[in-house]
Image: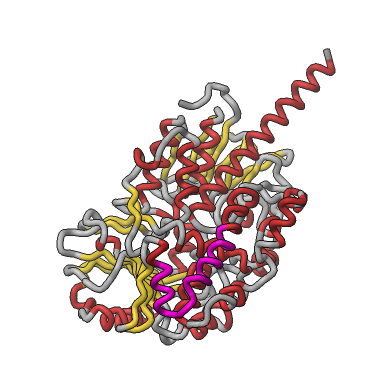
Amino acid sequence: MPSQLNWDKVIVIGAGFSGLSAACFLAKDGFDVTVLEKHSGPGGRARQFVQDGFVFDMGPSWYWMPDVFVRFFRQFDEEISAQYDLQKLSPAYAVIFDKDDVVEIPAEMKDVFAVFENIEKGSAVRLRKFLEEAKYKYDVGMRDLVYRPALSWSEFLDIRLFKSVLQLGVFKSYAAHVRKYFSDPRLIRIMEFPVLFLGGTPRDVPALYSLMTYAGLALGTWYPQGGMYKIVEAMHRLAERLGVKFCFNEEVTHIHVSNQKVDRVETLSGVRSADHVVASADYHHVEQMLLEARYRMYSDAYWSSRILAPSAVIFYLGINRKLTRLRHHNLFFDAPYEVHAEAIYGKPSMPESPLFYVCAPSVTDDTVAPHGHENLFVLVPLSTELEDNETMRRGCFDKVMLRLESFTNVSIREHIVLNKSYAMQDFKNDYHALRGNAYGLANTLMQTATLKPKIRSKKVDNLYFAGQLTVPGPGVPPALISGEIVAGLIKMDSYNRIKTTLSNVAATL
């Protein structure tokens, strides 16, 4: 039950994972919380698309870092098992290098070691060493780094943490780090894949992010039966039990500031007063479109200079037959990675043979497609600078389907009964996404920790930010953490304000 402290009114803009997280923590601490969401339901980028018996997760489909989810719900005396049915996938995923060259990553580590050893003699021992080091990074990161608001470098200056940072590989290339351990091109791709959506090539991403590889291989790949939206539903239920009020179909049009404080938030249907505002919507949109220029921390030039993670074109496909060769998660690395990377991060263009990812949740979950049918989520990472139009989408679709049909030995296009595409312009329209990005800022060295856009405004005393463009970064687990961090800041700031007020009153007596 929520605390009865009757604290300040907080408006949270956006009901994505970071907004839901912030709302839950704030309500738990007694704040009067209202969430304003432009769409008809919660979820943000993790919304759900349902049609003709098919149930699609529109955004996130990977469930990694299960400890973060457990930690979130336990802070509200809830267990995951009471919220949704979580299954560990086996195999975790399949990597397709060629029609007849498929490496499946097992769920258990002893089997992963065997797979590596079979591909490259001696690699099992080296993988064990790699993961021991990556586990250290994961433990230090989760214990000492990601839950800090990163408002100042002083947060990271204690001697113990400084020594840890030196061992994290912050200043080393992830690509070079992987090649210290492995030489087979297939193993290198498997080890590099977790960082491909961080916004740069493995050459540009710090070796720190081997912690992502540890999360994927050692902690496992999981799936909530019914889809990732089950997490959204669980958080929404929790928030309502805590007393959070939700207003859907309420897009914020202006944030009014007076005396360096937000005093009201305007939507198409009215005006709401606020003591604090958490912007869980796109950071750039909030700053550049909802605030007057004098209250913005960052200029157009700043945002133009940011390096973004890729955008994507996604195809939600309903197939009226089963496809026996696909696993739940499938990574198609059957084309040169360097060529696709150059088309994203070098000279923006449509790659001739794009790499792509296929999620087939109906392989393990018969609730997301009609009986005898298949549910496919096909994603192709693309440059945010690429023009989004029907010609581009159709061309990309045909290139991907040719290879998918060759791999499955099925003329899939003849069996499609539902086909919906989603790309850069949709990300802009639905989420006001900066340049139509799908994954937030790139996790480069110069865009990490305090070098990310600040989680608390320097120009508006009671305005805070959460989500993928601020700390700790993109992804579902970081979004949950971001909401928790910002709620903690608001609680601390409110406590300090009350303390100062009481001290001033006492001084006049």
In the image, residue 397 above or below residue 254: below
> What residue span does the magenta drawing correspond to?
112-135
Is 505 or 363 nearer to us in this picture?
363
The residue located at (29%, 61%) in the rendering is 361
- Quarter-of-image position of residue 421: bottom left
Look at 71% across and 41% down and name the residue there: 461
Near-viewer residue (330 or 412): 330
Q: Is residue 285 visible?
A: no
Q: Nearer the viewer, residue 498 or 85?
A: 85
Relative image position of residue 491 (x, y in whole percent): 63, 34
Magenta: predominant secondary structure element?
helix
Q: Is residue 302 above or below residue 478?
A: below
State whether residue 372 is above or below residue 123: above
Image point (51%, 47%), residue name? 480
Question: Residue at coordinates 51% horizontally, 62% vertically from top-left?
Answer: 214
The C terminus lies in quadrant = top right
- In the rendered image, residue 204, in percent from the top left (x then y), is placed at 62, 74
How far across and how far down the image is residue 427, in percent?
A: 46, 63
Residue 366 falls in image quadrant? bottom left
Q: Is residue 374 magenta?
A: no
Measuring from the top left, give residue 311's x and y in whole percent.
49, 69
Q: Is residue 233 visible?
A: yes
Number of numbered callouts drawn: 0
- Quadrant (top left/top right/bottom left/bottom right) for the N terminus: top left
